[in-house]
Amino acid sequence: TKIRYLLGRVYEFSSDAMKAEQEYKRVLHLDPKNAKTHFQLGGIYLQWKKYPSASKHYEQAAKVKPDYIKAVYQLGLAYSKQKRFDAAAAQFNKAITKIKPFIGKTGKDAKQKRRIAELSALIVEAYNNLAYAYHDKAEKARLELGDDQAAPHYSSAVSAVERAKTDSVANEQTYNILGLVYQKQKKFQEAINAFDQAAKIKPYFSIASYNK
């Protein structure tokens, strides 16, 4: 199965996802609990916008290997694409909880340092996508049920951003989503402040947000 898995990776690197899918399926036929292969196959289906199939394989990867943080995070993305916002938020929160013990650590060797660096980047994305999940749930509620039903979900999005700020992992995208939420809450000065903070972190980033 290792050769088949590596062959699948080669096909992926060469942008031949269809052949990669075939190889990963062969691996799983022989080794149904191969977490890495479930993860890679989930990525192909996410790329192809086959979100239920992506979810299925990320679920299996996380089930077989509970400490597979990237699988947990990717599962949140797949749920978000299906507008399963509560399920997505649960996975992003789970990923954040699993990552936090690594933040601020230095690592004993190059491998540990690389892992910590990857997780430090991933927690930022987890917080941002958590906020987006709450924002998108609020938008859905606003359109279907009205402003009053949307308000708690907008507040949850703000809380996600505040948690990111507390953990010192907020980036320009974090402040961008905060600005969008404040716009929807009609807190326009707060929105301007958030967009300005995004621009300070990364100049010109928030221009699109003002026009969104």
Image (tube, grey):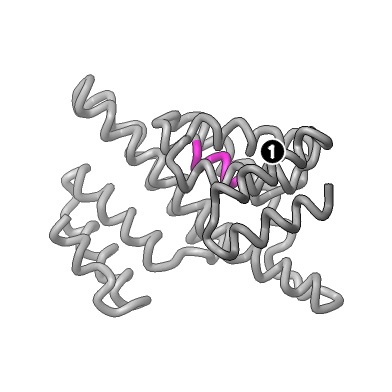
> Residue 44: x percent and y percent?
54, 47
User: Magenta-highlighted stretch: main secondary structure?
Assistant: helix
Residue at point 25%, 52% (across, down): 180
For mark 1, does the 10 Å Cα neighbourhood hold few (<14), some (14 to 19), or many (20 or more) residues? some
Q: How many marks?
A: 1
Query: Would residue 97 appear left or right of 125 to someone viewing this image?
Result: right
Q: Which residues are magenta?
A: 73-78
In the image, what residue occupies the spot 55% across and 37% down?
54
Residue 87 visible in this rendered orientation of the protein? yes
**Residue at x 59%, y 42% (from the top left corner):** 42
Residue, disc 1: 25
- 37 and 178: which one is in front? 37
Q: Is residue 77 magenta?
A: yes
Q: Nearer the viewer, residue 4 or 62?
A: 4
Q: Is residue 61 above or below residue 171?
A: above
Q: Residue 120: where, in percent of width, then height?
A: 62, 65
Work out whether residue 2 or residue 201 is closer to the camera in this orientation and state it. 2
Relative to 107, 118 lies left or right: left
The quarter of the picture where residue 186 lies is: top left
Disc 1 residue type (three-letter) = Lys
Report which quarter residue 92 is drawn in: top right
| Helix, strand or loop status at disc 1 | helix
